[in-house]
Amino acid sequence: MPEAPLHALKDRAEEIRKSVKDIKLKYNGKQLNAISISIGVFAFPTHGNDIETIIELADKALYQAKKNGRDRVFIAEPTEVIQEEKNL
């Protein structure tokens, strides 16, 4: 989402998360439990200037989302993710 503000990225990630949760799957004629996803969001160049940094920080945000209870979107400042990593 080039040039999108951070709040728009979070809103879109929430839409995706909710849409995945609404998917109804069956296997061998039986309804499967709902699936959920966690999404970590970081933006270029707001949170970093190169793709490696963005991917690394988004990955850390994803794990922070899972740690906070799963099935959520997490957007953090890079310093928050780095601080959390030090506490692990």
Image (cartoon, rainbow, N blue to C red):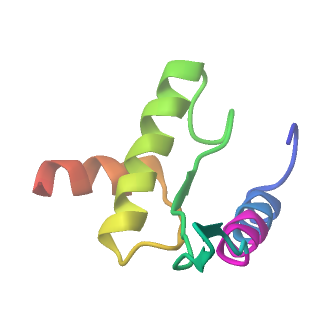
Which quadrant of the rendered structure holds the N terminus? Answer: top right
Residue 79 or residue 53, whichever sits in front: 53
Tell me if 37 is positioned left or right of 3 in this view. left
The magenta stretch spans residue 64? no
Q: Main secondary structure of the magenta part?
A: helix
Q: Residue at x 50, y 73 (%)?
A: 71
Residue 4, image x, y percentages: 86, 49
Residue 6, image x, y percentages: 74, 57
Which quadrant of the rendered structure holds the C terminus? Answer: bottom left
Q: Residue at x 54, y 70 (%)?
A: 36
Q: Residue at x 30, y 68 (%)?
A: 67
State which quadrant residue 47 falls in: top right
Residue 29 or residue 79, whichever sits in front: 29
State which quadrant residue 66 falls in: bottom left
Q: Is residue 34 above or below residue 62?
A: below
Residue 61, image x, y percentages: 44, 53
Boundaries of the magenta span: 15-22
The magenta stretch spans residue 20? yes
Tell me if 6 is positioned left or right of 62 in this view. right
Residue 64, image x, y percentages: 36, 61
Q: Residue at x 42, y 65 (%)?
A: 65
Residue 32 or residue 66, whichever sits in front: 32
Tell me if 5 is positioned left or right of 58 in this view. right
